[in-house]
Amino acid sequence: MPHTSTHPTPLDILGQVFGYSDFRGPQQAIVEHVVAGGDALVLMPTGGGKSLCYQIPAIARQNAGHGVTVVISPLIALMHDQVGALHEAGVSAAFLNSTQTQEESSALEKQLLRNELTLLYAAPERINTPRMKGLLGSLHERGLLSLFAIDEAHCVSQWGHDFRPEYRSLSLLHETFPDVPRIALTATADALTRQDMVERLKLEDAREFVSSFDRPNIRYTIVEKTDATRQLLRFIESEHAGEAGIVYCQSRKRVEEVAGMLEDAGLNAMAYHAGLDSALRQQRQDRFLREEGMVMVATIAFGMGIDKPDVRFVAHLDMPKNIEGYYQETGRAGRDGLPANAWMTYGLQDVVNQRRMIDTSEAASEEFKQVMRGKLDALLSLAEDTRCRRVALLHYFGEGSQPCGNCDNCLSPPKVWDATEAARKMLSCIYRVQQASGISFGAGHLMDILRGKATEKVLQHSHDKLSTFGIGVDLTEVQWRGVLRQLIAKGMVRVDPDAFNTLQLLPDARQVLKGEVSVHLREQAAGGAGERRKKSTKTSVKGMAEASLNAGALERLARLKAWRAEVAREHNLPAFVIFHDATLRAIAERAPQTLTDLEGISGIGSKKLQAYGNEVLRVCQTT
Ligand code: ADP
Ligand code: ZN
């Protein structure tokens, strides 16, 4: 190749290599800062476009003679696909991991020393092996160590939700190679984690780039749990038939049950959790990425780094631990920017379970537990909130916004009732029972007393003689559960995991008992809030996602998809790595006759145009 003195600009690279015409949000500023050798800390929501923030600098700096960018990523299971996607775009990249043989590793090392690679992916535990340190040292001596990119950087912090101890040693990189620039990226943005990350990775002098955390195409819905699996099935059938989605459950057992239930209902569903052996996990992950319309039922062991762009929904059947987790998990929906749903059911039992997990975790310090309780409370108030979900979510990440018009509370504002009196009844009932019997009781029993039910247990303890017996006949059991959930969420009542989940009053209960604070609650619709909305009042997300293509274009699209599936199989890559749906749709619409017609379609870079252009024309023209 003739030597040219001017290298392509970042914008040129964006267009030529990735086929995109514009940078998104702060991408350009980040890329320019890093290309110039600055350190950066990038906080961007899932799906915001973090990869390009280090891939484009890697290419630009390689062009300028700086050598390889080392990407540290915890996602060994995904490295093959990440590198495959770069190859498809014509970028020379490789990964180092424990599945490789000695010969493969040494071949790779030689390639690196010959300066033939632009990006090298490696797991954090790999970075600190003597061999890797030696290799990095040799590259550095030759001036071929261009940049360190630390992906999923929140893994360094125990306050994040994916703590990886191996990440701690990454500070050594900076100590050993202080002149090599670094870019750390994460989608986790709460202040505590952010600060910890900066300290642990010694990024005090890095420039921080904080994007808006809004994901406007995601519709947030949180419903009261009545019969979770039936609610889920109804949700999937009415909004997402045949589409890809992720269902999160808390336990392995529950994951298996729910996956089985969905399969029985005729859905293409699979289970995924840490109890399955790693080969099976990898196989299922590959199927989820490669097949269309799969539903993955999983524990949170699944999903980090899953960049499948067309996940149309993320459902939580159980409540996550905190808002960061919730936001990260729901963020896996709709990376392609098309409408998607984040849907959660939650109930009293979730609150109890999460509290118990915090209270009984033996490894954790009291300080840690306190932080975790605070984070759980924030999620609870989100769930009980009657205002715009997005406003509440963004507020949590320190961002102001206006009601979004695309969440359950905006689309059908919930009614609120004054539950102050009910809360007082509940609290005084807990108090009287404990006073009278000297021991505490669980939620079911207390509600029986309030609702005046003379059950065997009530009679046995003479609780029908209490002044609070039957004072709550005016409310349903569902309403009482709502009241109790609030009281637990507000830290007025505690569920004691060491004493059969009995209820105990906490000091804050006094405020309500004395009438100093009032309690307002969402009104519970019969059959579960928000799940039986009339069709006419709400456009389904599915309806919005269907592009208005004419018959000819639809036919071309079907042929293009079949062709893409074949190419993906041959290359052993997910279909979206070849072309995104949106790209195929744009091609189908344009009905291209010549290669020039394909230029400028988003997602077609020069390598893909060269590799697939003629094929695409042929597929479009067959009649
Ligand atoms: P993140 O790592 O932040 O979750 P990705 O890097 O996977 O997000 O990007 C999400 C999606 O957005 C990808 O499909 C990517 O190709 C696309 N994307 C990123 N930047 C741009 C851009 N400037 N223009 C168009 N699409 C983009
Ligand atoms: Zn809203």
Image (cartoon, rainbow, N blue to C red):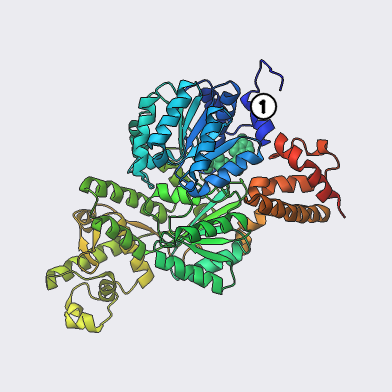
Give percent across and percent down for residue 297: 49, 62
Depth order, front residue of 310/51: 51
**Quadrant location of the N terminus?**
top right
Examine the rendered structure and indicate whether residue 391 appears above or below residue 461: above
Position of 617 compared to 305: left or right?
right
Give percent across and percent down for residue 218: 55, 49
Depth order, front residue of 28/143: 143
Where disc 1 sits, the SS reads: helix
Whether disc 1's CB lies below 8 Å from ligand 1 is answered no
Q: Residue at x 55, y 34 (%)?
A: 119
Q: How many marks?
A: 1
Give percent across and percent down for residue 315: 50, 59
Give the image quarter of residue 319: bottom left
Position of 307 compared to 502: left or right?
right
Q: Is residue 534 visible?
A: no
The residue sitting at the top extreme is 5
Depth order, front residue of 172/203: 172
Position of 124 compared to 146: left or right?
left
Q: Residue at x 37, y 39 (%)?
A: 167
Residue type beneath disc 1: Asp
* Residue with the mark numbered 1: 12
